[in-house]
Image (cartoon, rainbow, N blue to C red):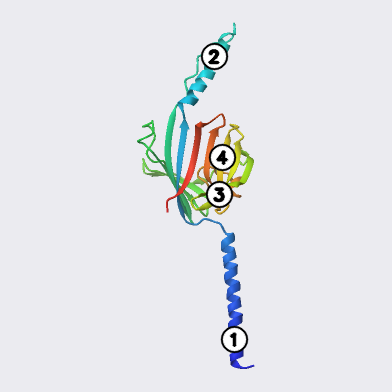
Amino acid sequence: MNIDTLSIKWVIAVTGTLFLFFGQVAAQTADDQTLRYAHFIIKEHWVQTQRLADSLVKGAAEAHRERLSIPNGPKPPLPPPPAVFDRKRNTHFIVEPEQYIFYSIVDEFSNDSILRPGISNIYRINGESQKLQEFNANSFEMWEEYNLPYKSDELYQLLEENKNVRKEICGYDCYQVLLKNTLTQRPVELYVTEEIQLEYHPVLNVKKYLSKYYPLYIRYYNADFPEDEYREYRFYKYR
């Protein structure tokens, strides 16, 4: 066997090894959906309309009249009317390998209350220890670290996973998931992606669901008044 033949075989062997190596790296990269760097803006919109308030007041008045018709029954006063509002807030959620940072900014110009701070506490989650620490921007005070709180896995019951109902959010392919809050019995609509793996969510921080997918749209609503009482969160990419 001459030197040229050995050289060709060596090149073929090295090339095959490199293809195999880079193929494994590509496969690992495709399987690893852990998000390492991102900056999201979560736009929150919380609404209770006059139509809802009028309906609740009417129902309370009818119940009140029924109680008054009882001869010896208690005569409680009418409850105060429910609040009517349209509130907006932006939450910055920054993802880095060693930490997550998030804080909220209230739209002070269009909100109906001047008692709310313009900026929330700034929260930092240590990526290694999973400890949460708060910084109060108004008093310029750093608080002690504490364990990252998660909501109970039993708080939300899975109703449907509709993979045929899809939309793109922040460049990620998402599908619809419907839950029910087991405390309020109210529905929750999500659009989730399986292309992101993160151990924390600023809104729906439930391990049971974060282990399967990541919500990029969340809507809590009143099934009887879906457009008159709701609270929704939409993710947008800041960069």
- Distance from label 2 to label 1 (Cα)? 94 Å
> Disc 4, disc 2: CB below 8 Å?
no
Q: Secondary structure at mark 4?
A: strand
Q: Can see residue 223? A: yes
> Given the image, on which type of amino acid does mark 3 rest?
Cys
- Distance from label 2 to label 3 (Cα)? 46 Å
Q: Which residue is mark 4?
A: 189
- Distance from label 4 to label 3 (Cα)? 12 Å
> Which badge, 2 or 1, comes first in the chain's sequence?
1
> Given the image, on which type of amino acid does mark 2 rest?
His
Query: Relative to the observer, which residue lies in front, 166 or 55?
Result: 166
Residue drawn at 50 percent across, 34 percent down: 230
Give residue 53's position: percent from left, percent from top. 48, 24
Q: Secondary structure at mark 1?
A: helix
> Which badge, 4 or 3, comes first in the chain's sequence?
3
Q: Disc count in the image?
A: 4
Residue 144: give its label: none
- Distance from label 1 to label 3 (Cα)? 49 Å
Q: Residues within 10 Å of mark 3 (few under 14, many from 20)?
A: many
> Which badge, 4 or 1, comes first in the chain's sequence?
1
> Given the image, on which type of amino acid does mark 1 rest?
Ile
Residue drawn at 50 percent across, 16 percent down: 78
Q: Which residue is mark 3?
A: 174
Q: Which residue is mark 2?
A: 64
Q: Which residue is mark 1?
A: 8
Q: Secondary structure at mark 2?
A: helix
